Image (tube, rainbow, N blue to C red):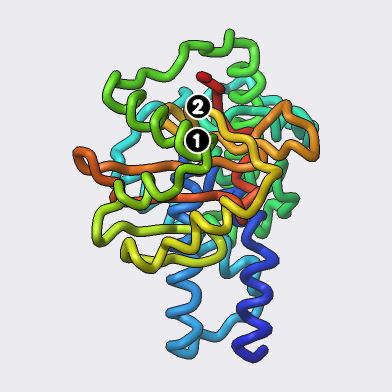
Amino acid sequence: MNSDEFEDRLKALRPRLHRYCARMTGSAVNGEDVLQDTLVKALHARAQGAGVDNLEGWLFRIAHNASLDFLRDRSRKTVVPLTEDVEAAPIPEADIVAISFQTFLRLPELQRCAVILKDVLGHSVDEIAVIAECSSAAAKSALQRARAALRQLAQEPEDTRLPLMSDADRRKITAYVDLFRNGDFDTIRAMLADDVKLDLVNRLQWEGRDKIGLYFTRYGEETKWRFALGAVEGQPAMLVFDSTGPMERPAHFVLVDWSESRIVEIRDFLFAPYVLEALDWVRLG
């Protein structure tokens, strides 16, 4: 497999890898960070001459370890106790896709890995064992326990609290959204830090206020987008709706980071629609 073919396979597998990383980390946004780390590690290993017999299994093993590294850095410890009341039946795909990412985070790591790989992505128990580096018996047991725990968690009422947002954060994102609505991109450009970073996820990364000016020009030329104040996984966000299609949920979203009154980073998920699956979002205005 040459380099172009390898990168084409990585691109094709990206949505499946994100489904795994997002549920392992409990966040669609953090899952994208772990996915990017996974792809960097895969490209580096390839450049170092790593032999790969099963590309998908190899990538999922890297993604699995990258997810665990992320979780250990965050020191997340909330788990569902193991239960002896084991239910072995698989959870229907429509039901498991609807389960929130935070719910998966309440499972122990191996249980989470097993149920995501089997019931979300369709891997076999033996494949799970290879990816998680455990025995097939341990993978099967973890899968059974995870299914039982998720069924139990599904009976609990959903947390419908609105995300907490400081007044300062609300004012900043509200102003940003209003400027987009009015097409006042010159004012936004004046708010950029000199070393501002743009991450057009799954497409390109730019740095520097002069370089990313074209980004706003492209938005100014497109008439179909509608912009709204919102929150994504509790973070202030600009929700972007496509007026040519259903307006029930955003087509994509944009996260903006500030340092005092200057914009230091923009993360735009226009080219990463897979991140929207089961995304925890709310429209605030």
Per the model, the C-alpha gap separating discs 1 and 2 is: 6 Å
> Which residue occupies the foreground of this view, 204 or 223?
223
Where does the image place residue 106, in percent across and percent down from the top left? Answer: 48, 28
Mark nearer the N terminus (1 vs 2):
2
Q: Which residue is mark 2?
A: 230
Where does the image place residue 178, in percent across and percent down from the top left? Answer: 47, 31
Where does the image place residue 277, in percent across and percent down from the top left? Answer: 66, 39
Q: What residue do we see at 64% from left, 91% from top?
A: 2
Farthest residue to the top: give it: 157
CB contact under 8 Å: marks 1 and 2 = yes
> Which residue occupies the foreground of this view, 80 or 257?
257
Total marks drawn? 2
Q: Horizontal placement of 235 versus 149: left or right?
A: left
- Say whether residue 106 is visible: no
Q: What residue do we see at 62% from left, 25% from top?
A: 150
* CA neighbours of label 1 inside 10 A, class few (<14), some (14 to 19), many (20+): many
17 up-or-down from 275: above or below: below
198 up-or-down from 229: above or below: below
* CA neighbours of label 2 inside 10 A, class few (<14), some (14 to 19), many (20+): many
- Say whether residue 198 is visible: yes
For the residue marked with disc 2, what is the amino acid? Gly
Element under disc 2:
strand
Q: What residue do we see at 66% from left, 21% from top?
A: 151
Please identify the quadrant where the N terminus is shown.
bottom right
The disc placed on residue 204 is none
Q: Horizontal placement of 130 versus 67: left or right?
A: right
Where does the image place residue 75, in percent across and percent down from the top left? Answer: 29, 38
Q: What residue do we see at 60% from left, 32% from top?
A: 146
Q: Quadrant of residue 135?
A: bottom right
For the residue marked with disc 1, what is the amino acid? Met
Q: Which residue is mark 1?
A: 238
Farthest residue to the left: give it: 260
